[in-house]
Image (tube, helix red, strand yellow):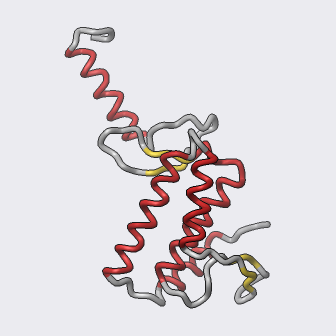
Amino acid sequence: MDVNAARVAELYAEALSRWRPTAADVGELRAVRGDLRRVFAVMRQDPDAGSRMLNDALARYRALPRISTGHDAPHLHFEAAGEGLVHWLSVSMLMAVVLFVCDGNAARLGLCASRNCRRAFVDRSKNARKIYCSDACAHRESVAAYRARRRQGGPDA
């Protein structure tokens, strides 16, 4: 199935424009972010635990598969129509991760190993072995390790 990314972005922008987030919405979305962060933290090492966490979150946020024919060809939606911003964003984010994991990509989810970074990331490298979210974080940690070795008079000093 071909996906028209521009059309998808247009539809998401249209959907988001319907809501004005409240302070309560922001708090609830931060909780979802925490749920997803925990999934990213464990999925690579323990896909079973990560999958259980996703299933629990899907139940908590009431993901409800349904066929939509409102625009373009019939396709799946997982959020209940009309339940508001938090529900729509929560279920959309969770289902994106679920579909990614079910497509064999559990090992590509991770949290940046840099001490100064808290980002979750999707590893897009060929060998799926990245531990940093970006080249900037990898370089910063490499320089810090080099400087620590120099201070201790170790190799590469």
Residue 102 sits in which quadrant? Answer: bottom right
- Residue 86, how many percent across, how many down? 47, 79
Residue furthest to the left: 151
- Which residue is at the front of the view, 96 or 57? 57
The quarter of the image holding the N terminus is bottom right
Q: Residue at x 56, y 34 (%)?
A: 129
33 relative to 135, above or below: below
Indicate left or right for 91 with 153 as reference.
Answer: right
The quarter of the image holding the C terminus is top left
Residue 69 sits in which quadrant? Answer: bottom right
Q: Residue at x 49, y 50 (%)?
A: 121
145 relative to 84, above or below: above
Indicate left or right for 31 with 122 as reference.
Answer: left
- Which residue is at the front of the view, 9 or 122? 122
Residue 139 sits in which quadrant? Answer: top left
- Which residue is at the front of the view, 20 or 80? 80
Q: Residue at x 62, y 84 (%)?
A: 80
- Which residue is at the front of the view, 11 or 128? 128
- Residue 57, how many percent across, how many down? 55, 65
Count of number-bearing discs: 0
Q: Residue at x 63, y 47 (%)?
A: 48
